[in-house]
Image (cartoon, coloured by chain):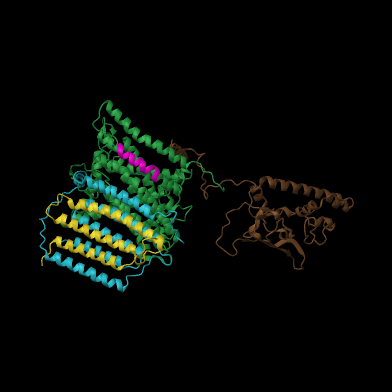
């Protein structure tokens, strides 16, 4: 009969109208500034830099200013200048690390190419700014966030990274111990290139730091990095 | 004579005169709507309540709408409904004719001794109107109804395009 | 507010009138009627403007709740910052509307562009004059009140045309023509649906129509017109036509925000737009008030035991209930297509309303039937209502069913 | 000269009538001519009401009934007249009366 469908529709909306008052399952609104939904762990938007010691955010950056990410970045939104001492020797940490998130496309390629696990994806989404021209250009200080924060936003991934780092550290320590006794060359060849690189970074001891490697695979090809610090 | 009547009369005639002189057809039609509303106000003043509302309903609600639709449907494409004002060659005879009619009418009205009845208590209600319509005037009511139906159908037939022989609007 | 001999009524019943008279008692006798009329106008305007403000909020709240959202609930009180469950939202909206730039398109007819919203609002306010809000609250006692109501309503169409034409925008103009086509189409069922009421009441006066619905069958069952077969059908037709006349969903094609820009309102902004908005809500309120008056017993209490509540309270309750249904329907139904809209009017509502006229005539003629004949009376009238509905509804559904698209 | 209300009403209606007459005679646009005729019809209606109101038997309401019928007929006239205007427009692409001088389209 004409009209029965209309009545059914009215019943549905009436049910919703009443239900939204007493049924929390129906009432799905989150009142944003006060209430926030937990973001999914894998949510990501823009990169940030990880540092290890919150007491010294800029000094303990994992970044060594190798500029791999700068070169890989598809929209070229990263700009890095390595810090040098008075004599012009590279200090293997960034003096300038600028990231323009108004250009960034959140592709995560910088994270994937980073051999040092120094750059990771952030979840900070309240990035609106009143400054139209420089507000979205983040500097080293803005980007630097602690490893604890990284654990907080991506727990699983961070745990994996930490485990890998610890393993490499242990390996490196073993290699060092081995180096102390037998020929040092053996240790270098056993370590895979990438891990070797990271191991050097994570170790407090100075890393080999090949002068800015063009890309990750190139690094291992060169036996030099495995060598004890050439210039540190 | 009350002030209200003079005001109504002045506004009605003035809006009608301006409407007849305007170039812009749409504005003319809208002003004529105002003029017809003025006539309705006169009915109200004269105590013919039902008639006033009928006037508004028919003239302002219906006839103005039909006129406006007709204006838009027959609008020359080049400009917004502006029509040439009356040319002097037509205006002069029209003014002479109108003026002489007005003169004759005014002379006749002023000259004739019209006796008005003493202020009658107006008690012509809608109920009485209905009784009159359904009683003595029932036949005319039916005829008017038939006339309206026929006129409506006739208007549709005349205005509807699409007879095979018709030249379609070339635009 | 009224010509009624109101002194016999209890104080609560004639409280508004008494208040008004107290306000004007210091004036000389010859000025008092003018002051009284002005006060009545101001009172009506203030009440309905407030109702308009609250309705905009209520509408958004209800729509929100139907979609399991809270609706507007943040706007704080100015300078205090206290949230009021959205009660300050109309205030915020009003300030926003007032401070917005008033844009008049180049080449637009400035005079008409300005006059259109003003005329629309004026005509919609005029309709409030003949609605009996309470036993002692009838602003203007007119012999032909129902006719007056629809005459004032018909004049609003002119304002819509003015808006469309004065904008000098072909889309505005086309939309205005569509709006007019809709309004004129639905004026017919609207008028035809109230003719049975006039027929049964034998009067065009709203107060008399309400008075006649003031009896109770067996002392409990109110004899409102909606509780008769013809009245029920008439009320439904009236309601559907009123939805279309006030441009409400699902008949809001003239200003379908999501599809057409805003129809004849496209070129309006700021306060003029607010006036259009206000006129739309006023029209909705006026039509609801008329529906309450004609079919739902006006200010009459539903059962005699509750008659101690002042009559304007009952009127307000019924009015608000009807307005809620307007919003409920908006929350439920999707918009009609223009062909469905006109088909519904001409092929369904108008024939039904005409048949309903016969039903009402039968009802009047058979008013003397009693006993088993009363049962027969209900049966015949019910058949007269239901039969055409089923027959016409079947044909209407055939056209409204699922469509197949050739190129989709 | 002492003018009664009836006189004034009649003067009002004759003024309206002449406005309509001048308009209908002077304008070439057929819609305006039609509107002029409508104005003249209204002037006639005003006369009827005036004579009813101030005449000898206002209680009978003949004037009101006459005007009611006249309004109905005016509505019919306007509908047909405008339909004719549209038909003319379809044939000659304008609505100037001077050019509407063919019996066949």
Does residue C98 show up?
no
Which residue ends up furthest to the right in the rendered image?
Answer: A183
Colour-to-chain, cyan:
B
* Chain C shade: green
Q: Quadrant of the N terminus of chain B?
A: bottom left
* Residue C356 highlighted magenta (yes or no): yes
Residue C198 in which image quadrant: top left
* Residue A5 highlighted magenta (yes or no): no
Does residue D8 show up?
yes
Q: What's the magenta region?
A: C345-359
* Chain A shade: brown
* Chain D shade: yellow
Locate residue A166, reporting x and y percent.
75, 47
Locate residue C2, reporting x and y percent.
22, 48
Q: Nearer the viewer, residue A97 or C114?
A: C114
Residue C12 in which image quadrant: top left
């Amino acid at each position: 009969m004409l009209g029965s469908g209309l009545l059914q529709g009215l019943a549905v909306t009436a049910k919703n109208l009443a239900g939204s008052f007493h049924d929390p399952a129906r009432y799905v609104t989150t009142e944003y500034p006060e209430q926030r939904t937990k973001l999914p762990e894998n949510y990501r938007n823009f990169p940030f830099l990880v540092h290890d010691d919150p007491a010294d955010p800029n000094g303990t950056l994992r970044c060594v200013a190798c500029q791999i990410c700068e070169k890989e970045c598809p929209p070229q939104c990263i700009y890095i200048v390595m810090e040098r001492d008075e004599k012009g020797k590279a200090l293997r940490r960034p003096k300038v690390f600028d990231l323009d998130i108004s250009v960034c496309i959140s592709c995560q390629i910088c994270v994937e190419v980073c051999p040092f696990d120094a750059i990771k994806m952030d979840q900070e989404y309240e990035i609106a700014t009143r400054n139209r021209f420089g507000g979205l250009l983040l500097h080293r200080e803005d980007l630097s966030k602690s490893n604890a924060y990284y654990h907080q936003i991506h727990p699983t991934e961070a745990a994996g990274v930490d485990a890998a780092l610890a393993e490499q550290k242990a390996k490196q320590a073993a290699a060092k111990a081995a180096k102390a006794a037998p020929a040092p060359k053996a240790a270098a060849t056993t370590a895979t290139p990438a891990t070797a690189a990271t191991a050097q970074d994570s170790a407090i001891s100075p890393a080999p730091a090949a002068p800015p490697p063009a890309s990750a695979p190139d690094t291992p090809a060169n036996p030099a990095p495995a060598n004890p610090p050439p210039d540190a | 004579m009350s002030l209200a009547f003079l005001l109504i009369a002045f506004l009605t005639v003035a809006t009608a005169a301006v409407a007849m002189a305007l170039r812009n057809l749409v504005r003319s039609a809208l002003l004529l709507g105002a003029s017809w509303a003025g006539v309705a106000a006169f009915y109200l003043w004269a105590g013919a309540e039902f008639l006033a509302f009928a006037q508004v309903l028919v003239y302002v609600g219906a006839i103005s709408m039909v006129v406006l639709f007709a204006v838009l449907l027959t609008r020359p494409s080049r400009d917004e409904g502006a029509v040439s004002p009356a040319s002097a060659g037509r205006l002069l005879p029209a003014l002479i004719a109108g003026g002489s009619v007005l003169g004759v009418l005014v002379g006749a009205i002023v000259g004739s001794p019209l006796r008005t009845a003493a202020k009658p208590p107006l008690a012509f209600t809608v109920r009485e109107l209905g009784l009159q319509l359904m009683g003595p005037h029932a036949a005319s009511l039916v005829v008017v109804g038939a006339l309206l139906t026929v006129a409506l159908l006739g208007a549709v037939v005349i205005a509807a395009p699409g007879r095979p022989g018709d030249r379609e609007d070339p635009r | 507010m009224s010509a009624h001999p109101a002194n016999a009524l209890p104080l609560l019943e004639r409280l508004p009138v008494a208040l008004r008279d107290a306000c004007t008692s210091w004036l000389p006798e010859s000025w008092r009627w003018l002051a009284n009329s002005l006060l009545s106008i101001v009172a009506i305007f203030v009440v309905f403007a407030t109702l308009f403000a609250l309705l905009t909020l209520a509408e958004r709240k209800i729509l929100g709740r139907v979609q399991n959202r809270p609706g507007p609930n943040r706007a704080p009180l100015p300078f205090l910052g206290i949230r009021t469950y959205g009660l300050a939202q109309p205030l915020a909206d009003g300030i926003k509307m007032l401070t917005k730039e008033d844009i008049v398109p180049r080449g637009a007819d400035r005079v008409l562009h300005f006059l259109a919203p003003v005329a629309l609002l004026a005509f919609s306010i005029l309709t409030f004059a003949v609605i009996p809000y309470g036993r002692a609250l009838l602003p203007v006692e007119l012999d032909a009140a129902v006719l007056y109501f629809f005459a004032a309503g018909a004049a609003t169409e002119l304002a819509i045309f003015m808006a469309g034409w004065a904008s000098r925008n072909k889309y505005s103009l086309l939309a205005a023509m569509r709006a007019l086509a809709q309004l004129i189409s639905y004026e017919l069922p609207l008028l035809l649906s109230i003719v049975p009421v006039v027929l049964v009441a034998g009067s065009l006066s709203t107060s008399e129509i309400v008075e006649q619905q003031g009896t109770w069958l067996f002392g409990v069952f109110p004899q409102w017109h909606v509780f008769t077969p013809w009245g029920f059908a008439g009320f439904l037709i009236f309601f559907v036509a009123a939805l279309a006349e006030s441009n409400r969903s699902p008949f809001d094609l003239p200003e379908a925000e999501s599809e057409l820009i805003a129809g004849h309102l496209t070129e309006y902004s700021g306060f003029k737009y607010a006036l259009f908005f206000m006129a739309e809500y006023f029209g909705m309120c006026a039509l609801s008030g008329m529906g309450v008056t004609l079919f739902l017993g006006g200010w009459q209490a539903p059962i005699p035991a509750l008659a101690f509540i002042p009559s304007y309270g009952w009127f307000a309750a019924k009015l608000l209930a009807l307005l809620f249904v307007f919003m409920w329907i908006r929350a439920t139904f999707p918009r009609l297509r223009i062909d469905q809209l006109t088909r519904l009017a001409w092929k369904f509502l108008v024939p039904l309303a005409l048949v309903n006229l016969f039903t009402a005539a039968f009802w009047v003629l058979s008013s003397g039937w009693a006993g088993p004949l009363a049962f027969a009376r209900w049966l015949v009238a019910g058949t007269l209502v239901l039969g055409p509905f089923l027959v016409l509804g079947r044909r209407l559904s055939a056209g409204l069913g699922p469509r197949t698209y050739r190129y989709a | 000269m002492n003018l009664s209300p009836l006189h004034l009403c009649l003067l009002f209606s004759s003024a309206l009538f002449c406005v309509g007459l001048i308009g209908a005679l002077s304008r070439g646009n057929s819609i305006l001519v039609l509107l002029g005729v409508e104005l003249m019809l209204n002037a006639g209606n005003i006369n009827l009401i005036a004579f009813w109101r101030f005449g000898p038997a206002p209680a009978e309401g003949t004037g009101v009934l006459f005007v009611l019928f006249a309004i109905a007929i005016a509505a019919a006239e306007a509908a047909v007249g405008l339909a004719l205007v549209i038909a003319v427009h379809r044939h000659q692409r304008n609505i100037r009366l001077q050019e509407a001088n063919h019996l066949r389209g």
